[in-house]
Amino acid sequence: MSEPDALKMVRRLGQKRAEADQMKREATEELRRFCGEAQRAGVPITLIASEAGLSRQGVYDLLAERP
């Protein structure tokens, strides 16, 4: 692979990673919001955690984070 091709690929993958980071931030914020909604609706933290694929502590940590 030539240097220009390698740099083009590095640039492309850097952009792809930045986009993935943004998507993760957005998904985390949505998950935080809906975990809070579920909690306010009376859903037990254990069930929220199970549905979200998190531990109970993970849900508590998520809910405690500031957006």
Image (spheres, helix red, strand yellow):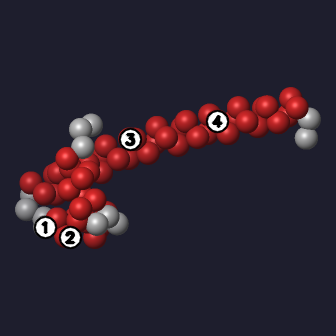
- Can the viewer see residue 35 in this picture? no
At label 4, the amino acid type is Gly
Element type at marker 3? helix
**Relative depth, front residue between 57 and 32:** 57
The label number, if any, that marks residue 14 in the structure image? 4
At label 1, the amino acid type is Pro
Element type at marker 4? helix
Query: What is the spatial separation of the Cα atoms under label 2 and label 1, in whole angstroms?
Result: 5 Å
Q: Is residue 66 left or right of residue 39?
A: right
The label number, if any, that marks residue 7 in the structure image? none
Q: Is residue 23 left or right of residue 34?
A: right
Query: What is the spatial separation of the Cα atoms under label 3 and label 1, in whole angstroms?
Result: 24 Å
Q: Are marks 3 and 1 in contact (CB under 8 Å)?
A: no
**Where does label 1 land, which residue?**
44
The label number, if any, that marks residue 26 in the structure image? 3
Where residue 4 appears, as percent x and y from the top left, is: 86, 29
At label 3, the amino acid type is Glu
- Check the picture and name the quadrant holding the N terminus: top right
Q: Give whichever of discs 3 and 4 has the lower sequence position.
A: 4
Picture layout, residue 50 above or below residue 27: below
**Where does label 2 land, which residue?**
47
Query: What is the spatial separation of the Cα atoms under label 2 and label 4, in whole angstroms?
Result: 37 Å
Q: Which residue corresponds to the image point at 38% horizontal and 41% vertical from the top-left?
A: 26
**Relative depth, front residue between 55 and 22:** 55
Where residue 31 appears, as percent x and y from the top left, is: 30, 51
Q: Are marks 3 and 4 in contact (CB under 8 Å)?
A: no
